[in-house]
Amino acid sequence: MVKEQADIWGEDGHDHSYLTIKELSEFDWNQETAQARWETPYRHVQWTESLKDCVDTFYTWSIPKLIELADGDLESVRIVFWFDN
């Protein structure tokens, strides 16, 4: 199934990789990251936010569901991803 999806992307899909749920669950999601944006042409705002807040439901829903799916073997479940042009 994953290979079929990757093949559909052809050359537009690149840098294929994966992370196990073990890696995702051990990652420090409390790290702060700098955010910034222009609210108006004359007002630039900056703030920090934890990575878990940035990824929202991936952290609060997806990771717990993947851990549940792993049924104790965190190396047995992984997410596969790639990037497009």
Image: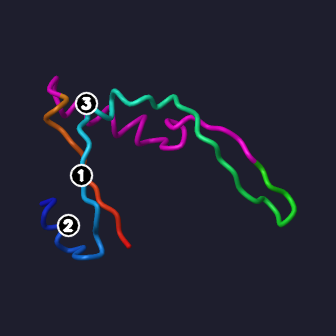
Which residue lies under the disc numbered 3?
22
Amino acid carrying label 2: it is: Ala
| Disc number placed over residue 80 in the picture, else none | 1
**Quadrant location of the C terminus?**
bottom left
The magenta segment: 46-73
Q: CA distance from mark 3 to mark 1?
A: 14 Å
Q: Furthest residue to the top?
A: 72
Q: CA distance from mark 3 to mark 2?
A: 23 Å
- Whether residue 57 is in magenta: the answer is yes
Amino acid carrying label 1: it is: Val
Label 2 crowd (10 A; few <14 / some 14-19 / many >=20): some
Residue at image point 25% right, 73% down: 9
The answer to which of 48 and 59 lies nearer the viewer is: 48
Q: Furthest residue to the right?
A: 42
Q: Position of residue 41 (x, y in %)?
A: 83, 66
Secondary structure, mark 3, is helix
In this rendering, the answer to whether 16 lies above or below 49 is: below
The mark tally for this picture is: 3
Q: CA distance from mark 1 to mark 2?
A: 10 Å
Which residue lies under the disc numbered 2?
6
Dot placed on the residue nearer the N-terminal end, 1 or 2 = 2
The answer to which of 1 and 26 lies nearer the viewer is: 26
- The chief SS type of the magenta part is helix
Please identify the quarter of the rendering in which residue 32 is found: top right
Amino acid carrying label 3: it is: Lys
Secondary structure, mark 2, is helix
Residue at image point 13% right, 35% down: 76
Taking the image as shown, residue 28 lies to the left or right of residue 23, namely right
Dot placed on the residue nearer the N-terminal end, 3 or 1 = 3
Residue at image point 28% right, 61% down: 15
Cβ atoms under marks 1 and 2 closer than 8 Å: yes
In this rendering, the answer to whether 59 lies above or below 43 is: above
